[in-house]
Each structure stands twice: as C-alpha cells, then as structure tokens.
C-alpha cells in the first residue's frame, strides 16, 4: 500500500517521538534520582554534619563551664552549663532522628549514652559540692570520673562528623556516576533517533519538495551535543498542509523540551552550588577567613563583579556593621568600613532585616574597575544574613546586569546556611576566648597561692613561736576534724592564716609605732625650740628627723591600708558628694605644692555633669590625692590638671576588663612629667613598684599609692586606667559609676577605718555624750588653760613616758607615770588630784582594757577623763577601748597638736 505524505510523516514523527520520549523518560528518571540524592545530602546528611559540629562545640563548652564553676564558684557558669546541656541533648536527639546508616546510628547511640552518663555524673558531683563545699575533692572527682567521659564525647562526635562527610562524599560520587550513565544513555537514544530521522528523511525526500526539504534540513541539523543553553532550532512554517502541521508540532515540542531542560538545569545547578558552598565553609574556624572565602565564591556565582561582606558587632551598647572582606573592591577607600544599624542602605537593611535591591544606580555610586576601564553597576543587592531571626551579617553585591530569579534563590538559600555557620564559628571563637581566660585565671590563682605561701614562710621566719602554735593548732584541727572534707580544712587554714597575719600586722604596728611615737614627739619639741637654745642647723636636723618619722608613719599606714583592702576589711561610707567640692579641695591642698615647684595647676568641671555623685567621699579624695601627689612628684616643669568629665566610650572600653560600666564619671589627672614606658604601665599598679624602679632612682616613695588606689577604685565599683607616653607625661583616669547605687540590692558594707578616724571622740553609755571633733580642731596654745593640771601616764615604754612627759611639762603640767595597770590604779588612789589619765593598751600584768574597767568600777572615777593610747591601730581597737571605759582614743604615733587639743578639750570642758 502506498503511504501518503501525512502517513509517512506521522509514522516518522511517532518513531522519533518514541525515542525522544524514552530519552526524556530516562533522563527525567535519573535526574529525579540525582535530585532526591542531593536533597538527601543537603537536607539530611549536611544537617547531621552541622549538628555534630555543634555537638563538638557544646561538649567542650559544658566541660569548660563545669570547670569554670568549680574554679571560680561563679553561678553564671552554672547557667551557661544548663543551657549547654539542654542544647546538647536537643542536638543529640535531632541527630538520632536524622541518621540512617547503621554504623552512624551505633555511634550516635553511644554518644547519647556517654552524654547522659556525663550529665548524671556532673549533677551528682555538683550536688555533693553544694552539700559539702569541698572544692579539692570535687576537682579530683571531676578529673577522675567526669572529665574522662567528657573527653570521649568530642572524639566520638568527630567520628560521627567524619562518617557523615564520608557519606556525603560517597553520595556525590554515586550521583556523578548516575548522571554520567544517564548522559550516555540519552546520547545513545538520541543517536538512534537521529539515524532513524535521517533514514526516513532520505526515504521521503524524493517525494517531498519545498517545505518538506526545509523540515528535513532542520531536523537533520539537530545533533547530539547541541548547545542546550541556546535551545532546539525552530522550523519556519510557510504552508498549512501536513508538512506545516509537522513543523508546528516540532516547534511546540522544541519549546517544551527547552523549558523542561532549562528548569532541570537551573534546579541542578542551584542544588549543586548550595551543596558546594555549604561543604566549603565547614572547615573554616574564624570569621575573617569565612567572610573572605564566601564573598570570593558567591560574587562570581551570582554574576556580580563587586562584593562586600559586613559582620555585626557591638560597641558602647550600639550595634554596628564592620567590613570584614570584599571582592574586587578598589584600594582608594571608597567602600565604607562600618555602618551603624539604620545608617545608609546597608544599615537600613540590617535594621529592617530585609533585602534592598537597586536597579537604577545613580552616577555617584562606586564604579566597577578593571585593567581596561570602569563602569557603573546596573543592579545592586543588599541582603542581611540571619540566625534565629537576628541579623548576623550583611552582604552587598553589584553587577552589570540585573540579578536573575535563580541567582536570587541561590542567595536566599545560601544565606540561611551562612547564618548558622557564622553563629557556630562565633560560638567556637567565644569558647576559645573563655578557655584562654580560664587558663589566665588558673595562672593568676597559682600566683596568688605562691604569694600566700611566701607570706606564710615570712611569718614563720619572724615568729617561730607563732609557727609552732600554728602547727599545733593544725595538728589538733586534723585530729578533731578527720571526717570533714578537705575543702573545709583548707578554708579553716586560710582563716587561721588571715588571723595570724592580722595579729602580726597589729604587733608590728605596735612595735613600730611605739618608738616612733617618742621620736615624733621629741623631734617636734626640738624643732619648735621653745627654749630658744638650738642653732638653726640643729632645728633643721630636728625638723628632718620629724619629717622622716612622718614618712615612716605614712608607710606604716599605707601597708595597713593595703592589708585591709586585700583582706576585705576596708570600710565605705557612701553619701552624696558635690563634684565642685572635689575641685575646691584639690585646689586648696595642691595649689601651694604647684607654686613651690613652679608648675601650673588647674581644675576643670565639664558642663552637663550631675552636681552630685553618690560614693564614699573619703575614699574618692584618697584616690584623687594619691594620683595628684604622683603627678606633682614626677613633674618638674609644665602643668598638672584635674578634669572631671563624662566618661567617653573609649574610656569605658579600656576599663571593661576590670569594671564593666555602661556610663561613668571620669576624674582625669594629667601631667607633663616623665611619663611611663608602655611595658611598665601594668607594673606600676603592683605593690612597692614604680616605673622608675632602679636602686638609684630619682624619685622616692614606696610604690603603694597606686596599688591602694586601684583597690579602692574596685571597692567603689570603678576602675583606674592610664595613658602615658614616656618623656611627655601621663593621664590617670578614675572611672566611677554615675548611677545611684543606694538602690542596689546588696548595700556596701559600712565599716570604720581606725587609722583615719584615730582622733574621733566616742563616749560610753554611762558618760555624758560629747560631740566628736575633727582632727583639724583649732588648738588653744595658752599655757594657762592646762598649766598646773595633773596627768597620769600609764605606759610600759619609758621612751614614750619620757617623750610625753617632756611635751606636757613644756605646758607647765604635772606628770605622774606608772609602768603597768596595777601601778596605775595605785597611783590614782594615792593622788586623788589627777585630772586625766593617758592609758596605753598593751601593758604587762594588767592590760589597758582591764585597767580601765577596774577604774570605771570605782564610783569616784566614773567621770574621770581616760584617753586610750594604742600603737596597733587595727579594725576593732577603737570600739574595744570605748567599750572598756575610755573617754577618747588616740592612735600612736601621737601628734602634739592633736594631743594638746584632746587634753584641752577634756580638762577645760
């Protein structure tokens, strides 16, 4: 039977369509299989990989948090530990649901079991620690029972991660094989279809002319390996017959195949690119490398020619975006390095948490440059990178052509994964920083322990009897508390050491102040030259002795102050302090010093400051005086300036390590002196240290002032920072919080500083209440006020008796003395005309406390003025003296003016 053209073409079309359908079906089947495999790699395997990376970080974090709490007893580590445990349990549970490979499931189950065992052991250890507070046993338990489990978790999680990376690699290789096989099969079927088409064309070529030749030529031109991006060719339709219908059908088929091929190509490219980018950033461990690697890869992938990567950061409580990396950016500095949230389009995209696209770029924008020229971009996109709804970074891309939908989709999906990666790397970096800080803290604790041991050795060398008592007490403590935990034993030992240190300081204070008392009194009498029988040189010698004694007294007071600061016994009296009064007091005290040295001294109080600051005025002035004294001491020409201002952000940032403050008042003392080398700026805050620390140094002093000032600043919830250039001067700045800490839940302890309040007057309940007078009370020097009065001195040191007697007799007073309490009571009974008693505390046989109690028990002496004298000047001495019956209290060494003022007050009242 003779076939018509339509039948022939229909037959040929059906055969070609069959082979094309087979090729398309095969291609579609394997492409779906590849897509499903890549989806599994991205959605499941990559998710498991990310989860195991998080597990490794969280395992290290929970171990560090547990160690940090045991070392510092800081409750914030417990909060961080609970958060790490919860998130780790969640990640382990997610991983168990995601893994499918039997080997990986076994590893995950082992990880879950070890993690549960670690947390159970941790809770048990923390419960025991909260019950017994034995830090050493707890640390031993942590090292022997808990830490070995924790050390198994991280390698196990790493093994799971390695296995997942291996599965991903095997999946990729398998997919490549499937794609290659599908391509080979499709090419084979296409080749068969091509040969069949040529055969049918040749068969009917003799019968079909004109349009049929055109159709045949077009179909013949379709070859295996054609450029899929250009699509299949189209046939020009010039007739409406069967050939025209064939041409129309061919064109429709070509259109359908082109659309399908483009869709599958874009989808495959998208999934492959996403998987490549996610895998690429897995091994990055710092944000700089991540930013540079990502912007370098994503910019050409999206068809852009310029790219910038901004990371979120915070400073002074405000959020910023800082440039971390760029692609093809010019070195001329036209790309801005930072934005605040809401500043510019970059800051606005971060503030709104949405993408911004520009398609009409103004001429003022930065051009894209190459070696052959430059041109403005046609399209700019600014997209935020999110993690859990928060902006972590922002990228900006510029291209010569508009961004396509597939490029936009790539950006959206990749940036979601990028946010997780940024958070993971930032967390890892934070953990590394915490680990470094923990190591530094451990070293500091070790240094403090060594210093404590050194102090113990010095105490044993000074007083062997005290060491023997300590050993006996330690032995008895071990025998009585054998069943107690080792931590309680160490706490008891530390408390005992502190007590011995306090007793040692008190005894040393007494032993130093007792001879110093007579030295100061006698040298003061000589320097006054009341009898006029000394030469000018002798008066100068006496004045020098008196001044040296005062220097020694200041050294003793500084050592006691430093000891009280270190032992936590320093005392604060917070109240409202006028900032203007700080300037006035500084001018009153240091203007004469400036005039004497020929220096310029001025004070500044910035506008806009609150008129008052709530703090301890005495401690504040002590710090300011120390800093001003140092400034004048180390400045030989130029000026010294005190400026009170609002603390700048750089000041707050510099002080953040010692005293994190949101806002503060800054007391800056600047000078044009010798300055401090950068390598010695931390050394000068240590006790007995100066920047000029050589044996032949030019400047005197003990080096305790800055150490005491720094500790005082910490007690006031502040900090001291220093900026200095050697040879050009220094600026020491005291930062104090400008908030009213009267509203804080934990009020500062209010104690009494005996060294500073040595001349306050306090009366027992049974005596008339007399107002306290300050140490600068005007002194009446007329001898008639106290001449002829009788004073009894009870002291076992003849040097003090001689010195005080000489001073009192210079005022025409009668002086009796006794060397112990029993002799003092006898003298009172033998001489009823005694007007006042000066009572030393540390006396043989009967000490000053018992002597005063005995005297007060006698009705005839109930109102007799008794002035207590002590050289210990420790914390509770004043209260003990008043409680024992003293009318007043004086700390040795005694100043003659203060002594005469107190005597005049009590004998002439």
Image (cartoon, helix red, strand yellow):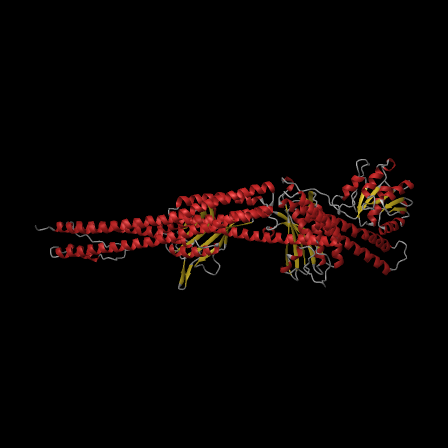
Which quadrant would residue 130 be assigned to in this image? top right
Q: Which residue is drawn at 49% across and 59% down?
A: 333
Q: Total label count?
A: 0
* Residue 341 in view of the camera: no
Who is closer to the viewer here, 514 or 201? 514
Which quadrant would residue 528 be assigned to in this image? bottom right
**Image coords of residue 756 (percent x, y):** 75, 47
Who is closer to the viewer here, 507 or 767? 507
**Image coords of residue 524 (percent x, y):** 84, 53
What is the quadrant of the C terminus in the image?
A: top right
* Residue 371 in view of the camera: yes
- Toward the left, the furthest residue is 1
Who is closer to the viewer here, 532 or 184? 184
**Image coords of residue 310 (percent x, y):** 47, 53
Who is closer to the viewer here, 204 or 881? 881
Using residue 79 as the reference point, say whether residue 281 is left or right of it.
Answer: left
**Image coords of residue 861 (percent x, y):** 86, 38
Using residue 651 as the reference point, say whether residue 108 is left or right of it.
Answer: left
**Would you place residue 740 above or below residue 22 in this image?**
above
């Amino acid at each position: 039977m003779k076939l018509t053209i339509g039948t022939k073409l229909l037959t040929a079309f059906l055969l070609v369509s069959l082979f094309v359908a087979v090729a398309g079906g095969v291609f579609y089947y394997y492409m779906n299989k590849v897509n499903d495999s890549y989806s599994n790699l991205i959605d499941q395997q990559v998710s498991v990989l990310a989860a195991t990376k998080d597990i490794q970080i969280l395992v290290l974090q929970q171990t560090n948090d547990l160690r940090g709490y045991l070392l510092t007893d800081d409750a914030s580590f417990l909060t961080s530990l609970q958060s790490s445990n919860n998130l780790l349990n969640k990640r382990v549970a997610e991983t168990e649901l995601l893994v499918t490979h039997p080997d990986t499931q076994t590893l995950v189950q082992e990880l879950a079991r070890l993690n549960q065992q670690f947390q159970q052991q941790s809770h048990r250890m923390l419960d025991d620690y909260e019950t017994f507070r034995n830090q050493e046993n707890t640390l031993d338990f942590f090292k022997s029972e808990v830490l070995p489990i924790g050390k198994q978790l991280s390698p196990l999680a790493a093994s799971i991660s390695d296995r997942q990376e291996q599965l991903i690699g095997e999946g990729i290789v398998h997919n490549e094989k499937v794609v290659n096989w599908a391509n080979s099969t499709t090419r084979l079927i296409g080749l068969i279809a091509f040969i069949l088409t040529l055969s049918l064309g040749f068969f009917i070529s003799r019968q079909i002319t004109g349009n049929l030749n055109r159709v045949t030529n077009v179909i013949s031109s379709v070859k295996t390996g054609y450029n899929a991006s250009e699509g299949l060719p189209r046939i020009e339709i010039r007739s409406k017959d069967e050939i025209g219908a064939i041409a129309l059908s061919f064109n429709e088929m070509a259109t359908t195949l082109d659309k399908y091929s483009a869709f599958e190509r874009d989808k495959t490219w998208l999934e492959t690119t996403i998987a490549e980018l996610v895998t690429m950033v897995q091994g990055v461990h710092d944000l700089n490398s991540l930013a540079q690697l990502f912007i370098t890869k994503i910019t050409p992938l999206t068809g852009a020619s310029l790219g910038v990567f901004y990371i979120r950061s915070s400073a002074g409580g405000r959020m910023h975006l800082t440039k971390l990396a760029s692609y093809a950016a010019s070195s001329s500095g036209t790309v801005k390095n930072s934005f605040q949230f809401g500043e510019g389009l970059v800051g606005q995209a971060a503030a709104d948490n949405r993408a911004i696209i520009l398609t009409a770029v103004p001429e003022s924008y930065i051009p894209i440059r190459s070696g052959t020229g430059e041109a403005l971009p046609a399209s700019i996109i600014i997209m935020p990178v999110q993690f859990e709804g928060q902006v972590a970074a922002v990228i900006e891309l510029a291209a010569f052509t508009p961004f396509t939908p597939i490029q936009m989709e790539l950006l959206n999906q990749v940036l979601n994964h990028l946010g997780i990666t940024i958070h993971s790397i930032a967390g890892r970096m934070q953990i590394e920083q915490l680990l470094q800080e923990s190591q530094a803290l451990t070293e500091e604790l070790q240094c403090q322990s060594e210093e404590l041991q050194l102090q113990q050795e010095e105490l044993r060398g000074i007083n062997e009897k005290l060491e023997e008592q300590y050993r006996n007490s330690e032995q008895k403590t071990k025998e009585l508390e054998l069943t107690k935990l080792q931590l309680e034993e160490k706490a008891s030992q530390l408390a005992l050491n502190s007590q011995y240190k306090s007793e040692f300081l008190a005894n040393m204070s007494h032993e130093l102040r007792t001879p110093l008392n007579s030295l100061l009194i006698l040298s003061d009498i000589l320097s006054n030259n009341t009898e006029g029988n000394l030469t000018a040189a002798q008066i100068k010698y006496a004045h020098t002795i008196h001044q040296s004694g005062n220097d020694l007294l200041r050294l003793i007071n500084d050592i006691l102050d430093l000891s009280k600061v270190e032992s936590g016994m320093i005392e604060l009296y917070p109240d409202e302090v006028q900032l203007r009064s700080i300037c006035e007091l500084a001018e009153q005290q240091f203007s004469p010093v400036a005039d004497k040295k020929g220096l310029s001294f001025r004070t500044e109080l910035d506008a806009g400051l609150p008129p008052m600051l709530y703090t301890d005025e005495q401690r504040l002035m002590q710090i300011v005086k120390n800093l001003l004294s140092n400034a004048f001491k180390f400045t030989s020409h130029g000026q010294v300036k005190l400026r009170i201002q609002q603390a700048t952000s750089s000041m707050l940032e510099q002080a953040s390590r010692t005293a994190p403050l949101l806002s503060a008042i800054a007391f800056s003392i600047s000078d044009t002196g010798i300055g401090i080398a950068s390598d010695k700026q931390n050394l000068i805050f240590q006790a007995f240290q100066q920047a000029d620390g050589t044996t032949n140094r030019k400047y005197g002093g003990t080096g305790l002032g800055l150490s005491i000032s720094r500790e005082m600043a910490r007690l006031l919830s502040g900090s001291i920072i220093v900026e200095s250039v050697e040879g050009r001067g220094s600026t020491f700045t005291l930062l104090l919080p400008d908030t009213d800490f009267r509203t804080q839940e934990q009020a500062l302890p209010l104690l009494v500083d005996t060294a500073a309040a040595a001349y306050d007057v306090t009366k027992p309940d049974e005596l008339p209440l007399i107002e306290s007078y300050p140490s600068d009370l005007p002194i009446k020097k007329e001898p008639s006020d106290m001449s002829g009065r009788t004073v009894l001195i009870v002291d076992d040191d003849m040097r003090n008796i001689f010195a005080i007697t000489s001073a009192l007799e210079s005022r025409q007073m009668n002086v009796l003395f006794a060397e112990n309490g029993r002799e003092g009571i006898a003298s009172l009974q033998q001489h009823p005309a005694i007007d006042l008693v000066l009572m030393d505390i540390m006396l043989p046989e009967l000490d000053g406390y018992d002597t005063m109690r005995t005297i007060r028990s006698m009705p005839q002496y109930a109102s007799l003025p008794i002035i207590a004298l002590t050289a210990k000047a420790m914390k509770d001495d004043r209260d003990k003296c008043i409680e024992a019956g003293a009318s007043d209290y004086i700390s040795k060494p005694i100043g003659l003016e203060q002594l005469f003022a107190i005597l005049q007050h009590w004998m002439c009242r």
